[in-house]
Amino acid sequence: MSTTTPKSRTWTSPEGVTFTAVEVYRDQAGHVYYGFEDPLKMPAARAIEAELAAEWANLNVTRDDLRAFLASMREHGQKGDIVGLFQVLANLQDRVEWACEGRSLLELAKVYYLVDDEPIERTTERHNEIKARAWASDNAAKGFFLREAFSRSSPPAISSPIR
């Protein structure tokens, strides 16, 4: 069972657990975004996706980036190009050391936040594409969701305000 009001959405799982998402943002294109009242309580499928996205965000690399790095390393290795291989390895090592890599954080935000009529219980490719297009063209929205994902994935000492 699902209900919708202008400021919140709820969904009740087949097991009778109710999840509520509240409106948190409207972008320039008019898309409405919702976040969970308690981010630690979200439907299981979405929570699993969030955990995986958080792990990639902690690595500061997306799955596609890592695949590209490995393919490049394999290619350099097969050619016997040790210098090229170590350049790619150094690039990957630098990536791991970066404080933040935006794409992996936006992937995390796609799980934490719903857009428009996106199902509460899980993400969908269509809705993830809507988010990606919106954030690519709306810097204010992109900044909002980068900050939100960073604050949810960083230890409190890093994400708490400076006093």
Image (spheres, grey):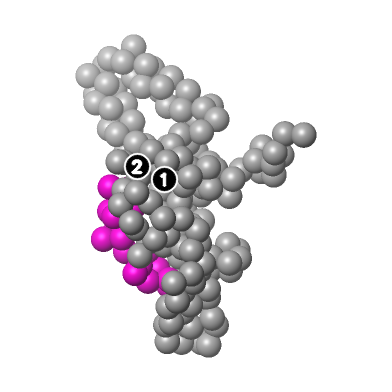
Name the residue beneath numbered marker 1.
141
Q: Nearer the viewer, residue 71 or 50?
A: 50
Marks 2,1: beta carbons within 8 A:
yes
Q: Which residues are magenta?
A: 117-133
Which amino acid type is marked by label 2?
Asp
Name the image quarter holding residue 135: top left
Task: Tell me residue 10's x, y (percent).
Answer: 48, 77
Is 39 displayed left or right of 8 in the figure?
right
Quadrant holding the N terminus: bottom left
Residue drawn at x 31%, y 60% as measured from the top left = 127
Instruction: State left or right for residue 68 relative to residue 17.
Output: left
Residue in the foreground of this view, choosing between 48 and 67? 48
Q: In the picture, which quadrant includes the C terminus?
A: top right
Q: Where 85 sits versus 62, above or below? A: above
Kindly identify the residue that appears in the image at 24 percent across and 26 percent down: 75
Q: Residue at x 33, y 56 (%)?
A: 30
The image shows residue 115, relative to residue 58, as above or below, that is below
Please identify the residue farthest to the top as the structure is shown. Answer: 83
Is residue 29 within the magenta segment? Answer: no
Q: Residues within 10 Å of mark 2 (few under 14, many from 20)?
A: few
Res. 2 visible in picture? yes
Judging by the rendered image, the residue that carries numbered circle 2 is: 138
- Of helix, strand and loop, which one carries label 2? loop
Work out which residue is located at the far right of the displayed protein and give it: 163
